[in-house]
Image (spheres, helix red, strand yellow):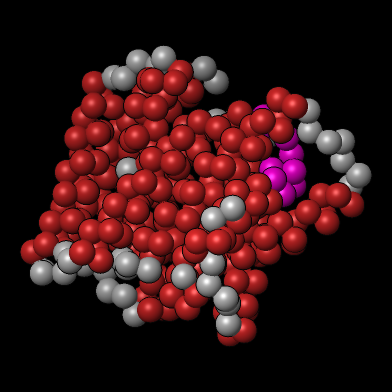
Amino acid sequence: MSAHRAPLLPFAAALAGVGFLSLMDAFMKEAALMIGAYTATVLRAFIGAGLIAPVWLARRPAMPSRAVLKLHLERGVVSAFMALTFFHSLTLLPLAEAIALSFIAPLIALYLARVLLGETISSAAILASLLGFAGTLVIVGGRIGSGAFDEKAAWGVASVFVSALLYAYNFIVIRRQAQVAGPLEIATFHSGVGGLVLLTLAPFAWETPVAAVLPWLLVAGALTVAGSFAIAWAYARAEANVLVPTEYSGFVWAAAFGWLFFREPVTWPTLTGTALIVTGCWLATRPQRRAAAASV
């Protein structure tokens, strides 16, 4: 297989993973509206772990080393609150709008890489950040202009931003994790650790689930496992700068699923703001893609 064709399969796997997770978001929005974001998030995590853990254990794997376990725990904690804040935002905002705002995560990741890894922030990255900020203002401004930016929407936007900050840090962790553990192991610990972490809040936030929500959560759990597996497999076989652009396909998926499941319209401010944010992300990763191509 040629060097140019090698990334195609990981790229396709990452694209499929984003599609699985976008569909999962639609199922989780329905579940969260029925029983609350917290309870839905906890149950989804344990359902996912229950589906994937037996498959991983059936292979009689060696237990992860202390260093690898530390990575699993780190990502599990981050992912737990990343998921909780995002699913909470879905109960307050349209699906496509929440996904669009979450696209600022790659831009935040640039600055986290500067702080945590000492990487230089280029002029292109600064321009990208400005475009991303402008896109966010357009989306939020569209709500204000339509008179729909109430307290509920404000909390939704704040929840997305917290989730995006955690997801940006997740970008840094997942690449290291994928280099030292297999997809089955990663998916098992991702769901299991996340569920256990959130379970500590049960005395304060748990709501007794109704039977009608179980099919939604079962499908969401299965889609979580499929998406996590596909993305972990892809990140173990291709550089992050090659795969990050697949995240942007999530808006297309979200717009489609938001309309199919909830009849949510996609507004022009949301489309325009998304275009600005995605353009910013593309500019930010363009130098890395050129460098990667030059080294082939």
Residue 30 seen: no
Count all numbered tags in the image, as a single digit. 0
Residue 62 image position (x, y, % from top left): 87, 36
Of all residues, the one furthest to the front in this rendering is 203
Position of 25 compared to 149: left or right?
right
**Can you give x and y, in whole percent of width and height, for residue 75 in the image?**
58, 39
Q: Could you tell me which quadrant the N terminus lies in?
A: top right
Horizontal placement of 151 versus 53: left or right? Answer: left
Queried whether the magenta region covers residue 174, the answer comes back as no
User: Can you give x and y, in whole percent of width and height, for residue 237 in the image?
Assistant: 64, 34
Q: Which residues are magenta?
A: 177-189
Would residue 202 be visible to someone looking at this image?
yes
Residue at the image point whose x is 17% and y is 60% from the top? 269
The single residue placed furthest to the left in the displayed view is: 145
Question: Residue 69: where, in percent of width, then height?
Answer: 71, 33
State the residue at coordinates (30%, 33%): 283
Q: Quadrant of the C terminus?
A: top right
